Image (tube, grey):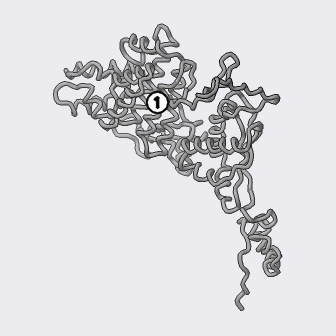
Amino acid sequence: MAYIPLRSRYKIYIIDEAHQLTREAFNALLKTLEEPPPHVKFIFATTEPNKLPDTILSRCQRFNFRRISTSQIYEQILKIAKQEKLSYEPAVLTAIARFARGSMRDAQSLLDQVLSYAKDKVTMQDLENLSGTINPDTIFEIADAIAQKQLERLVKTVDDIFVTGKDINNLLEQMVEHFWYLALSLIDPKDTILKEQVIGDTARYRKQASAFNIDTLLKNINLITETKKGIKETSATRLWVELLMIKLAQVEQNGTVTPVQARTPTREPVKANNPVIRESKNSAPEPVAKPAPPTNPEPPDNQENHLAQGGDISLMNDDDKTKLWSRILLEVKNVSPYKIYPFLKEGKFIRADQHEISIGFTKQYNFHRTRMEEIQNKKIVEECIEKVTGQKIPLSLTVIASPGQDDAGFNGANGFANTADAVDPMKKEVMKDELVRKIVEAFDGRIIEVKDAPR
C-alpha cells in the first residue's frame, strides 16, 4: 500500500466474504481504514453485513446489491443465445432463468455447461440430466394428481424421479415455488408479479390454481417445508417423500388434513324407531332394550375427538393419558429421531392436565433431563404436544426416585446411593469433609465405597 499504482489511478483491494475475518484482523485494518492512503480503495464483499463490526461499518460506504429479476436474466441469456446462434428448446432458457434464483453469473454458467453437454440442440432433458432439476411439466402433473387425489399416480411419479436419480431437494424446492406461483395467481388477478417470475403465458398457472384455494396452497407449502427439515435427519428419503405426496392429496379445501387411513367405525347407538331384532328358530323376534342414557356425562372414549373439541385433558383417565404421551413421543420421533427422541424416551410419564405435561427422569438419566431442559429442544417437544393435542401445553421435567429407592436415599445432594449408605458411619464421616461435600454437590455424585487412605 506504500507504493502508488504505475498505470491506474487507484490500487483496489477486494476482500471477499469479509464477515469471515476475525476481530483481530479487523482491528489490524482499522487504523488503515481511518486514514487510508489517497491512492488505495478497499472493497469488503459480504452476504452477512450484520456480522461486520460497527467500527468497520461506520468507516465504509455501503452499497446493497440485489438479485436480478427472472425476466432480466431471461432477456440476457436470450441475447447470448441469439448472438452465438445456438439451437435450443424455448423452455430451456426459461428454466435456466428461473433456476438461477436471481444470479446472472449462475445463469450464464448453467447455460455454458448445458451447451457443452448437449450434442446438437439443447433440450430440457439435457438440462435435467446436467443439473438434477425436475421438468416443470412434471411439477404440473404432480399438482394435478394432488388436486384430483390420485395417490397411485403420485407414488408412480415419485418412483420415476428416484429411478432417474433426480435431486429430491430440487423437487421439493420446485414444488414450494410452484404452489406459491399458484397462490400468486389467485392473489393477483392481473398476474403482474407472476409474469415477472415465470416468463411467458400465465394461463396454465391460472387454470390449475382454480382447483385450489389460498388455505390449501399455504398448507401444502408448510407440509413440504416440514418434510425438507425431516429428510435431513433420516436416510429413508423416499419414504418421507411418498408420505408427503399422500398428505398433500389429503389436504381439504379448508386447509385441514384428513387421515389417509380411515378410522375404525364406532358402533352407532340403537335408535328407538329402528330397534335391533334378535331372531330365534323356536321363538318370536324379541326387541333388544335400548340402554338408558347416563345421568352424568362422561368424557368421550376417543381422545382425538375429545381433544379436537377443546376437551380438558384432566377429564381423561390415566390409561388414555399414557396413550396420549405415547402419541406425543411418536410425533417427536418423526420430527427429531436422533437429536431429541433418544433422550426424551428415557423419561417416565407422570401426569398431564391443561396446565402442563410432567415427565420424570431418574438420577441415572440426569444427563438426558439436562439435554431436554435446553430451550430449543424443549420448544420442539412443546410444538409436538400442540400438534397432537391441538392445545398449547408446557412441558415440565422433574427428577424422580429410581425403583426400590425412597426419597431420602435418592437425593443426589446427600451423596449416598441408598438409605443403608446414609447410616454407614464411614461414609457419613467422609461427607463431613467440606471439600468432599462440594465435589459431590458439584458433580451430582454419591459415595460408593470408602477405603483407608494409604499411609
- Quarter of the image where the C terminus is located: bottom right
Q: Secondary structure at mark 1?
A: helix
Q: Is residue 412 above or below residue 299?
A: below
Residue 160 visible? The answer is: yes
- Quarter of the image where the N terminus is located: top left
- Extreme residue toward the left, this view: 120
Residue 274: x %, y % from top left: 65, 18
Residue 86 falls in image quadrant:
top left
Q: Nearer the viewer, residue 99 or 356?
A: 356
Residue at the image point whose x is 77% and y is 38% from the top = 314
Residue 28: x %, y % from top left: 54, 49
Q: Nearer the viewer, residue 56 or 453?
A: 453
State left or right for residue 455 relative to residue 210: right
- Extreme residue toward the bottom, this view: 455
Q: Is residue 199 above or below residue 238?
A: above
User: What amino acid does circle 1 point to?
Assistant: Ile
Residue 392 falls in image quadrant:
top right
Kindly identify which residue carries mark 1: 246
Q: Is residue 309 above or below residue 438?
A: above
State left or right for residue 83 relative to residue 294: left
Residue 70: x %, y % from top left: 40, 21
Q: Nearer the viewer, residue 12 or 384?
A: 384
Residue 104: x %, y % from top left: 36, 27
- Extreme residue toward the front, this view: 282
What is the crowding at mark 1: few (fewer than 14 residues within 10 Å), some, or many (at least 20)?
some
State left or right for residue 350 relative to residue 103: right
Q: Is residue 441 above or below residue 100?
A: below
Residue 354 visible? The answer is: no
Q: How many marks?
A: 1
